[in-house]
Amino acid sequence: MEKIITRFPPSPTGYLHVGGARTALFNWLYARHTKGKFVLRIEDTDVQRSTKESVDAIFEALEWLGIEWDDGPYFQSDRFSIYEEYIQKLLDSGHAYYCSCSPERLEEMRKQAMAAGGKPKYDGTCREKKLSKGENTVVRFKAPLAGTTVIEDIIKGNIVFQNSELDDFIIARGDGTPTYNFVVVVDDITMGINTVIRGDDHVNNTPKQILLYKALGSALPAFGHVPMVLGSDRTRLSKRHGAMSVTAYRDMGYLSDALINYLVRLGWSYGDQEFFTRDELIEKFTLENIGKSAGVFDQEKLLALNADHIKTTPPKKLIPHLLPFLKENGIENQDDDYLEGIINTLNIRSKTLKEMADAAMFYFRDTILYDEKAAKKFLKPAVLEPLELLIGQIESLDVFDEKGLEDAFKEVMERTGLKLGKIAQPVRVALTGGTVSPGIFEIIEVLGKERSLARLKSAAQFIRDKK
Ligand code: GLU
């Protein structure tokens, strides 16, 4: 079978948002699934709106998502000589012509058409004039006047356009610069693209592009137009719905694996499976399972999926992802084993990495600051005796492990007649400063003997000082 070659061609006029990222993902996954090739092309012919910052932001977002391209990045702004060559080809073969109609005349024509309730369409004045290039002449494509153009869409089925609805659109402006639909086709042809998956906001461009392929004698790629992503009110997704740039999700503490999983599911399905690892997506992604209806972006679902990915990623692998958030909290240069242990206690209760970093702070403090209410309620004189007993028990442990700790607590319970619940909460406050945390046995194990003892002793001293 022919090798599948897909592409992602963002226009660098802003950040990479979640909708664009989903399109990139579909193309990338399909290329990976088929062991094909994925091309990155920056569509920066709109010089006014394209910026270097956007280009960099797109690269940064793709890299974070782990969407690696095999070819490119190509920049359309570097390819004007290729476009010129193809414009000439169409002129030479009689598929395009120079047009000298003035903007004023065209505007007049447009107004008349609108007034008559019709679609503005070039009237073909210069179509058969065989004009040569002149000052401000544009190049128009000579579109067929009758018949139909059909998109055999992989996702939507056949979409039929009447050629009479299409007009002789401009492929090169008066200053010689090529127009959008034309450069897309030239690029897709010269880059060998045979599969085009893109948002269905492009459906109306496709018949024009198909005509250009045919005029250039090139085979058509397979087209698939993916329904747009909608916001919760079922209007097109925008910032208003909380949809942000891809990197904003990174900064909020999302794992790229979770965002990828969520975005792919928003428009693609595999039975009713919700959770996918990256490798599973590559293995299972096919175009047949892209849905016909629009996906609705749901922040809560994304958050829940992020929690699932945090839970199932081996703690050791989470370390590099957590580090930036710890750094933001002023925590650096920690031992990997310590971090792994910490993550192990927090991964089942953190929805984001940021939440995890915040919850982890007690592990790094030299002095525990007690939450006022918690201290009042749990660090009371009556706790002093069991606390001191516990300190003694732990100090005398030869082997500091789960079993040893359990025995230590049991001994305290037996000697004081207190239930574990009565001891656990004061110990929790002593170790963490608050009343919400992972289990105290887990914490003690992670903190280790020395740190745990220091904290328990501080709490005992705190109680004594208060007396
Ligand atoms: N540059 C276009 C966009 O960002 C994509 C064009 C295409 O996929 O053909 O929407």
Image (spheres, rainbow, N blue to C red):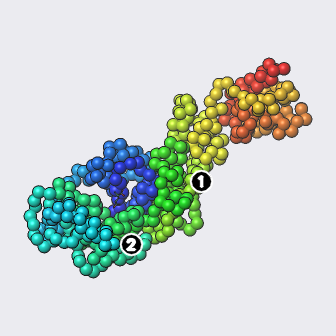
| Residue 62: assigned label | none
437 sits left or right of 228 in the view: right
Quarter occupied by residue 124: bottom left
**Residue toward you, 186 or 340:** 186
Q: Residues within 10 Å of mark 1 (few under 14, many from 20)?
A: few
413, above or below 52, in the image: above
289, above or below 177, in the image: below
Q: Residue at x 72, y 30 (%)?
A: 371
**Residue toward you, 396 or 450:** 450
Q: Residue at x 44, y 46 (%)?
A: 64
Residue matched to label 1? 300
Single out the residue that lies furthest toward the bottom.
147
Q: Position of residue 370 (x, y in %)?
A: 72, 28
| Secondary element at tag 1 | helix
191 sits left or right of 54 in the view: left
Q: Position of residue 83 (x, y in %)?
A: 20, 58
